[in-house]
Image (spheres, grey):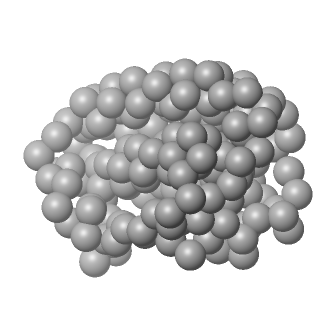
Amino acid sequence: MDAQHYPVYYQSYIEKVPEGNLVDLLDFSLSESLKTLVMIPESKGDHRYEEGKWSIKDILQHLIDTERIFCFRALAFSRGEQNEIAGYDHDLYVQNANADQRSMKSLLEELRRLRASTIDLFKSLNDEQLKLKGKANGQVLSVEQIGHVIIGHEMHHVAIIEERYN
């Protein structure tokens, strides 16, 4: 994966993504992430490694919300959307998501189901659609690049959990 062909904002995520078929990578990355995430006990879900940082449940909800948003962007661009799509305030989303009222199990189940839907979306797209570009939050990305951002974003946050929450 050549991170230099992505907007600078996403390069740190893309650098983490190995080469390979996008659909296979979407499946593999979640499988690898779940190896870490399913081992986190429910009692640790509300843990924050530092005052003011997100809890593990907050991170899981953030992964879910962000994947949904990026899938919408991929869908819109693949259908030829020409209007720029607005960005979103991820801190505000986390603040209002009530992840602390959910179980780790429910968040992980939702993440699994969402990824299955994400894979279905990307499987449905042909090569021409994957190359289509659009603009969201001031950044121009192709549909295929969005898929890689989803993977890299997930890998980034799972690495943070592994490094700072254990």
**Residue at the image position 15 percent from the left and 53 percent from the top:** 98
Give the quadrant of residue 127: top right
The residue depicted at 51 percent of the width and 46 percent of the height is 76
Left/right placement of residue 14 relative to residue 163 reads: right
Front residue of this view, candidates 90 and 155 = 90
The residue depicted at 42 percent of the width and 68 percent of the height is 86
Name the spot of residue 84 as percent of width and height, x first. 51, 66
Residue at (20, 50) in percent of width and height: 99
Q: Vertical placement of 58 versus 105: above or below? A: below
Q: Can residue 151 be seen in this view?
A: no
Position in image of residue 166 (x %, y %): 45, 53
- Relative to the observer, which residue lies in front, 50 or 13? 13
Residue 10 image point, x, y percent:
66, 66
121 relative to 96 in the view: left or right: right
Q: Indicate the position of residue 31 as horizontal and vertical percent values.
A: 58, 27
Residue 30 visible, this angle: yes
